[in-house]
Amino acid sequence: MRRTKEEAEQTRCALLAAAETLFLEKGVAHTSLEHIARHAGVTRGAVYWHFTNKAHLFSEMLNQVRLPPEQLAERLRGCAEHDPLLTLRGLCIDAIENLARDEQKRRIFTILLRRCEFTAELREAEERHEAFINLFIQLCEQQFAQPCVSQRLQPGISPRLAARAVHALIVGLFHDWLRDPKLFDPLSDTAPMVDACFRGLIKDWD
């Protein structure tokens, strides 16, 4: 029984690896489950044994990397005495720097942001992606809305607007660097860009 479970897990991992390779090369919409099965060297039936459909497989591939909303929620739960702004700043910097450090995360985010057309077939995955975006903005807004932070916001900047500015920064840097890694160095340039954003949101940001 153990051997069978190990073989099943090996097949599942092979399918996820094949999907990652083909999604990156051909795009999600142009990759079928048949393509993935053939690339992994298994039958199409083996694909359906592990995954309900392509949306399920796509979501499981995304689950291999931790997205910023998950990281932020974990940090907030793990540190009751956290500084909201420093927590957000650290998350923003880590999110971009990790693209340079983690090859798999770089591949998967390239697929998500540059190789994925959310067709009807991927509606479930699209809804999950949108839910993560909304969760990230909501968590950011909660931090900016804390009394110790909201009074420090620049005139005319509400917690809601500040949260959207931070989200726009993260998404913009992700897109730009994945499109052209020569645009900036994530390991040396991210912190100054993040601080510039926070300086525009927080009156006494230093």
Image (spheres, grey):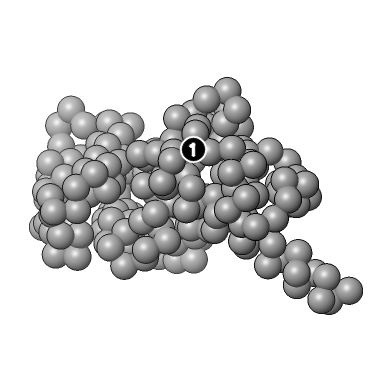
Q: Which residue is mark 1?
A: 28
Q: Residue at x 65, y 57 (%)?
A: 41
- The quadrant of the picture occupied by the C terminus is bottom left
Left or right of 48 on screen, residue 82: left
Mark 1 nearby-residue class (10 Å; few <14, some 14–19, many ≥20):
many
**Label 1 element class:** loop
Q: Is residue 21 visible?
A: yes
Q: Residue at x 49, y 34 (%)?
A: 30
Is 195 above or below relative to 202?
below
Depth check: give the residue in front, 98 or 50. 50
Q: Percent position (x, y) of residue 31?
A: 53, 38
Pick the front one: 127 or 93: 127
Query: Which corner quadrant holds the N terminus?
Result: bottom right
Residue 61 is situated, as x and y percent measured from the top left of the image, at 55, 51
Number of numbered markers: 1
Horizontal and vertical percent position of residue 161: 27, 31
Q: Quadrant of residue 128?
A: top right
Q: Look at 17% across and 41% down and name the residue there.
A: 201
Question: Is 150 or 18 nearer to us in this picture?
Answer: 18
Q: Nearer the viewer, residue 110 or 42?
A: 42
